[in-house]
Image: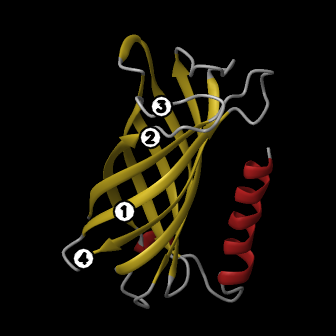
């Protein structure tokens, strides 16, 4: 629960302290971004998830908000989490959420960037130690976007049901993503 509170605080911070109050969000100046990412689960102390694997595809409409900052409306049309290599326990589903990205190159929305995102996931099967089929996926990442539209990003991601169920063993993963903006 503390982590979710921290993520909400960081998102509000990004919106109100980085976002210029006089700036207009440029809805029509946005661009589409596709990303495929994946990586291993981590041992979180309660459950050893080091044999697990997270894979997902993301489609985002990224909207310039300030010369350095953009907001993204995100869809996860494919989400797969394999637990301990046991195919029958594989969690799969879809999700939607929001993201924010802070770029180093003003007005170009490329170069080194930091990002934060939060999603709601609906899925079949359940994560070990988690009693809900609705969970939240939050993440923090750092990446680089090339002038040609290609990007790569490394993220720390957390999946939890935010105590919607008594069983709330979270999932942590380090993922590597590759994508293209058009």
**Does the residue at mark 4 contact the one at mark 2 (Cβ under 8 Å)?**
no
Q: Which of marks 4 and 1 is nearer the N terminus?
A: 4
Residue 28 in the image, given as x and y percentages of width and height: 44, 70
- The CA distance from mark 2 to mark 1 is 16 Å
Which numbered tag is attached to residue 76? Answer: 2
Instruction: Answer above or below: position of 91 versus 53.
Output: above
Question: Which structural element holds mark 2?
Answer: strand
Residue 30 in the image, given as x and y percentages of width and height: 41, 69
Question: Which structural element holds mark 1?
Answer: strand
**Does the residue at mark 2 contact the one at mark 3 (Cβ under 8 Å)?**
yes
Quick one: 172 or 134, which is closer to the camera? 172
Q: Earlier in the sequence, mark 3 or mark 1?
A: 3
The quadrant holding residue 98 is bottom right
Question: Which structural element holds mark 3?
Answer: strand
Give the residue at mark 1: 153
- Seen at 57% across and 27% down, the residue is 122
Residue 65 in the image, given as x and y percentages of width and height: 55, 78
* Drawn side of residue 22 relative to residue 50, left or right: right
Q: Earlier in the sequence, mark 2 or mark 1?
A: 2
Residue 93 in the image, given as x and y percentages of width and height: 46, 25
- Seen at 51% across and 55% down, the residue is 73
Quick one: 128 or 177, which is closer to the camera? 128
Instruction: Answer above or below: position of 155 versus 13.
Output: above
**Does the residue at mark 3 contact the one at mark 1 (Cβ under 8 Å)?**
no
Which numbered tag is attached to residue 146? Answer: 4
- Seen at 73% across and 82% down, the residue is 17
Give the residue at mark 3: 94
- The CA distance from mark 4 to mark 3 is 28 Å
């Amino acid at each position: 629960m503390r982590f979710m509170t921290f993520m909400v605080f960081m998102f509000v911070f990004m919106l109100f302290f980085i976002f210029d109050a006089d700036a207009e969000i440029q809805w029509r100046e946005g661009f589409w971004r596709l990303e495929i990412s994946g990586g291993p689960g981590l041992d979180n102390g309660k459950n050893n998830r080091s044999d697990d694997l997270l894979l997902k595809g993301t489609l985002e409409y990224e909207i310039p908000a300030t010369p350095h900052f953009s907001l993204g409306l995100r869809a996860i049309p494919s989400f797969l989490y394999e637990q301990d290599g046991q195919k029958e326990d594989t969690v799969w589903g879809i999700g939607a959420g929001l993201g924010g990205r802070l770029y180093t190159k003003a007005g170009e929305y490329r170069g080194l960037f930091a990002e934060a995102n939060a999603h709601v996931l609906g899925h079949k099967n359940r994560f070990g130690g988690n009693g809900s089929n609705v969970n939240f996926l939050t993440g923090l990442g750092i990446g680089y976007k090339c002038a040609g539209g290609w990007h790569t990003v490394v993220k720390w991601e957390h999946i939890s049901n935010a105590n919607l169920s008594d069983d709330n063993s979270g999932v942590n993963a380090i993922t590597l993503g590759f994508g293209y903006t058009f």
